[in-house]
Amino acid sequence: MPFTIQPAEGPTFVNREEELKDMLGTLKDASSTMGFALYGKRRMGKTSILKEIHGRLLKEKNIVPIYFSIWDIIERNVVEFTRELSMAIVEGYRPHLSLPHKTKELLGLPINFIKNIFSGLKLSVDVQDSLTFIFSLGKEKKIEQGILIDTVFALPEKLAKETKKKTVLFIDEFPDITDIKTNGKRLEDAIIKKVRTIQEGYKRTSLNISGSTRRTMESAVLSSASAFYRQFIVKEIGPFSKEAVRELMDRNLVKRKISKEGVDVLYDFTAGIPFYVQFIGRLLNKYANEKIETDIVKKAIDEFLTQEGDFIFKEELEKLSDKEKLIVTTMAAKDLSSFSGISEALSNQVTNIGRYLIYLEEKDMVQKEERGVYTFTDPIFKKWLKRKF
């Protein structure tokens, strides 16, 4: 089986059996609306878990799973968000509605034509009106923003009731919903509170979310002050175990095996982070040795850092301000983690270090381990910085 740097699902999915068993057992229950909140650092495989469960639930007769990522929204405004999420929901239900057209095909049609299509289906007037409203977005000039949010999050429940199914809605990177704008202003926590209010009325819909940044997940779900506090079964998604890394290598390396020592080197470098394990696995498949020893693994790691690392990390680094770049490069080059050490090293170049560390936390570059101690969220990013600078 091939290694993949895209979210793994189906044959490429490995490990996480405990998480899958728990989640599938709950989500398959037609009488339960309980959902899950997955959180963990970037590249840990949260999206892979959501997509794998989505794929497995597609085989269930009375379940309609729908996957949507906030990161797929380009303009980040309310109209675009509402339209794209609605399209995903309707497309998921299309086989159960006997809708002859793909949802994207309907967007360019006149409103009257769309009304005729929905009126020809055996749907309640309420559902017909909701669908017509959604597909008229962009054609009507004045639309109340709050009505858009109400309509899109009420839609999965309406369709579930109409078809006597259960909706399982997955929203990836959910906390980023606060960045959606209306009239140029971010909705912030107001949209999370509105979604929470709508979710309280769900009888046939299970909302499931994920998030990469600890600070934003705390604001949305984890802290006692958050709107969704104790409304989800929370699961922290961590790295692969060394055994899972070996399983992935044994399964996907083509006509060659990796030695125990090779796995040790690979695991020590990647820290078990699935994205990097998969990426270096792809590089290892290029070598013709029948058995991959530590020298080959080190060669692949070196290739990753010198070539692929530039492609992966340079864009992330460029998103930082000059002072933020100086802080992270100094932390990496000098192995600094204490606030006092960072401040001392940059005392003549950066004032108010604490403020910039907060910015870096918000951008998910560093995390506060304890009072006065900051570490890199992604240890491989640190290794790349150390080599580069």
Image: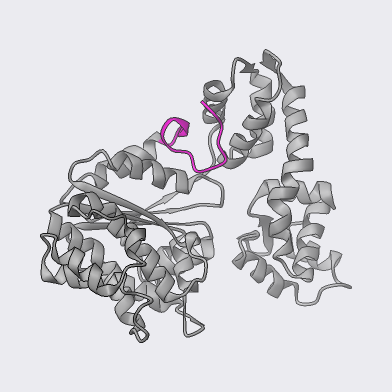
Q: Residue furthest right?
A: 348
User: Is residue 217 positioned above or below 262 on the image?
Assistant: below
**Does residue 389 appear in the picture of this structure?**
yes
User: Is residue 87 positioned above or below 192 on the image?
Assistant: above
202 drawn magenta: no
Q: Count the labels in the image.
A: 0
Q: Position of residue 308 (x, y in %)?
A: 72, 43
Residue span colored magenta: 1-16
Front residue of 92/15: it is: 92
Front residue of 312/265: it is: 312
15 drawn magenta: yes
Q: Position of residue 212 (x, y in %)?
A: 52, 57
Q: Quadrant of residue 101?
A: bottom left
Q: Position of residue 245 (x, y in %)?
A: 56, 30
Q: Which residue does the image show at 47% across and 63% down from the upper left? A: 217
Q: Is residue 277 left or right of residue 99?
A: right
Q: Residue furthest top?
A: 290
Q: Quadrant of residue 365?
A: bottom right
Magenta residues: mostly which secondary structure? loop
Q: Which residue does the image show at 80% across and 77% down from the upper left? A: 351
User: Is residue 105 positioned above or below 302 on the image?
Assistant: below
Q: Quadrant of residue 264?
A: top right
Front residue of 55/102: it is: 102
User: Is residue 41 positioned above or below 372 on the image?
Assistant: above
Q: Is residue 206 left or right of residue 185?
A: left
How is this picture coloured? Answer: one colour
**Does residue 196 appear in the picture of this structure?**
no
Q: Which residue does the image show at 32% across and 59% down from the upper left? A: 103
Q: Position of residue 46 (x, y in %)?
A: 47, 48
